[in-house]
Amino acid sequence: MESDQTNGKRTKPNWGVVLVVGSGVLMSTIDGGSINVILPTIAEELGEDLPVVQWVVLAYLLGMCGMMLSFGRLSDIVGRKKIALMGFAIYGSGAILCSLSPHIAFLIGFRIYESIGAAMLQSTSPALMVGAFPAANRGRAMGVNGSIVSIGLLLGPLVGGTIAELIEWRFVFLTGVPFALLALAVGPRLLTDTHTSKSDKFDISSAALLLLWISALIYVLNQGQRIGWADYKILVVTGFFISGITIFLFRQTKIDHPLIELGVFRLHTFTLSLLISVLTFISVAGLALLTPFLLQNVVELKVGQVGMVMALIPAGSVSLAFVGGTIVDRFGPRLPATAGILIMSGATFSFAFVDESTQLYEIAIRAVFVGFGQGLFMSPNASSIMGSLPTNRLGMAGGFLAWARNFGFSAGQAGWGAIFTAVVTSHSGVTTTVDAPTGPLLEGFQVIYVGGAALLIVCACMASTRGRVSTPSEIPGMSTR
């Protein structure tokens, strides 16, 4: 069996590992893109409003956010191969259960189960991908990873829209099953075990606390506007959030084997890159969640057309993702990441001017430029995060990378969804967005797009201060264990 994939001695890419890891990345990203597209269809067929149907996505993101840091840490202890293969098994079975759900409550519950497998895969994929390439080609590795992500996001809306229009929306959940079966068939032979840390321990209490405070935060962001910020439920859950995060952070400073080694936040490049990632994905979460509703309910496109438009975002991204990785290997992450965020900001702002008279090609151009910005941003920022921690903490770095993306999306979708609902209902006098006329709907969309573009400007200013990445030999104030 091969030695640690992160030992830096590899001289050429291990394409077998890339195949297996890429299958997991492709599977999960196709899921994300396809489910967002069919949310309006699910809402219509099940007779549910946006705040309820939104939990089909939020429950999935919430499970990943609450568990991927835990699995990233666990993979450093027991080995990434074991965690990845378990992830494929859980994800594949969860997808089948979702397709068979008889009610929205079952669907949301099975999405939480499915998210456990997704958390395992997304927390181990970056480290496995980096380990499959020579140490000097970390940017290239993240470029390959970013390209696969973009391809998955490209296929997701197309697959989701086509299946929902031609067959039925339930079949969309089955698209990941073939990838899971492929990975389970060849993964045990192609993946290699990493060196494990037998002296480390996994703290289950910290993992539970992490899941508690993240769940509480997402619930408050999503439900606060709907049931009232002063409602006792919101106040109680807010108390859970505050107490949960406080106890979690305190515990990390007192135990010998913390889930999160807080010393990582003394590394400026790591902390800055992680914060930029979270804020950027918060910024674009509203666009990802609400644009299908804009296109289907206001512009009145068919669901298949909506899928094609949304697919143009990752199409633009995949065209530049590998370029971004190559640029960062030569010049560092500052220039491509900053330029990418500024392009995303301008394109997001332009969506505020879409209305029922906007032509399809005009919307398509906007979508492509959002993708161009994402392609330039993702690889450099991912490379910064992965390169900012010691090589024996690549599992932790990968967990943080995946967590930042999914926490940003979940918090952003919860927050922007609540803001959109509040704007629309206050301007229309109706209690649900489903019943709102076009005018108030457009006002809600405009607030989301302008707000997202403004937050991206803040992210670009932060990215412009970042220099080259230097990998430390250990975490400040910690032993390398």
Image: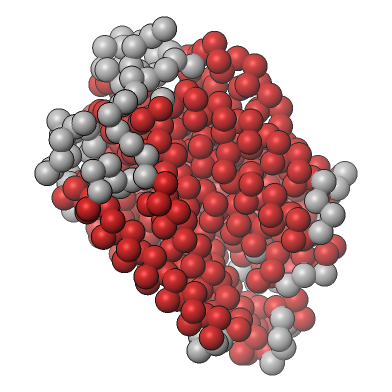
Residue in the picture at 70% in, 64% down: 53
Nearest the camera: 243 or 166?
243
Left or right placement of residue 473 versus residue 417 in this view: left
Q: Tell me: residue 244, above or below residue 220.
A: above
Residue in the picture at 56% in, 48% down: 313
Query: The N terminus is located in which quarter?
Result: top left
Q: Residue pushed farthest right?
A: 167
Residue in the picture at 39% in, 65% down: 244
Query: The C terminus is located in which quarter?
Result: top left
| Snapshot quadrant of residue 52 | bottom right
Q: Position of residue 65 (x, y in %)?
A: 47, 52
Q: Is residue 145 visible?
A: no
Q: Position of residue 312 (x, y in %)?
A: 60, 46
Q: Is residue 47 visible?
A: yes
| Snapshot quadrant of residue 456 | bottom left
Q: Tell me: residue 189, above or below residue 202.
A: above
Left or right placement of residue 464 versus residue 12 in this view: left
Residue in the picture at 49% in, 74% down: 237
Nearest the camera: 281 or 259?
259
Q: Position of residue 225 (x, y in %)?
A: 56, 82
Q: Tell me: residue 109, above or below residue 324.
A: below
Q: Position of residue 390 (x, y in %)?
A: 22, 32
Q: Residue pushed farthest left?
A: 477
